Image (tube, rainbow, N blue to C red):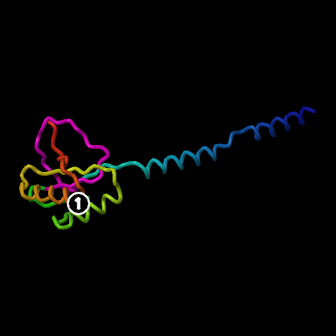
Amino acid sequence: MARKKRKLASQNSAEDDVNLTPMLDVVFILLIFFIVTAQFIKEPGVEIERTEVDNLDKQNPLGILIAIDENSDIYIDKQQVTLQEIGFRIRELREENPKGKLVLQADKDSEAGVLISLLETINKEDGLTAVPVSVEQE
């Protein structure tokens, strides 16, 4: 009689265990969802020495980051581009992220003419009349 009770108790404990497999599946699906939808930090690909100001405005979500280095070369996504390619690249990046903000990073030793030409191209392609320029906070 005691053996039957032990046998029944061991069978019940096996059936009472919680199956964690479905919960792990849901956790992995959520992890994949957050990784895919996360916005990653954009970097221009070159070291830019920015001018210092006391403006604290931030641009979120950042979609397009265009950099001008000290030699007045233009970079988008760590690739050097010419002024003629900027319009195409902006249209291409707008298809990927239509709500993202466009921000310029200009080195303080770069030529002003390149910055002005770039602003004119951005105005023509993207319709922006006021383009945020990334600067270093004091």
Q: Which of 52/59 is in front?
A: 59
Question: Which residue appears at 35% of the width and 58% of the height?
Answer: 96
Question: Which residue appears at 31% of the width and 50% of the height?
Answer: 100
Q: Which of 81/89 is in front?
A: 89
Quadrant for residue 13, please give it: top right
Q: Which of 10/15 is in front?
A: 15
Where does residue 23 sit, x and y in percent of width and height? 61, 43
Q: Residue furthest right?
A: 1
Q: Is residue 8 above or below residue 84?
A: above
Side of 132 relative to 1 (left or right) = left
Q: Quadrant of the N terminus?
A: top right
Where does residue 127 sit, x and y in percent of width and height? 23, 55
Decide whether the magenta segment is chiefly helix, strand or loop.
loop
Quadrant for residue 98, please give it: bottom left
Q: Is residue 33 above or below residue 81?
A: above
Q: Quadrant of the C terminus?
A: top left
Q: Is residue 138 above or below residue 46?
A: above
Where does residue 48 sit, x and y in percent of width and height? 15, 51
| Image mark count | 1
Identify the amino acid type marked 1.
Glu
Side of 66 relative to 30 (left or right) = left
- Badge 1 crowding class, 10 Å Cα cut-off, few under 14, some 14 to 19, many 20 or more, is some
Give, as a single range, the part of the protein colored magenta. 44-68
Q: Which of 49/67 is in front?
A: 67
Q: Does the magenta stretch include residue 43?
A: no
The residue singled out by tag 1 in the image is 125
* SS category of the residue bearing label 1: helix
Where does residue 89 sit, x and y in percent of width and height? 26, 63
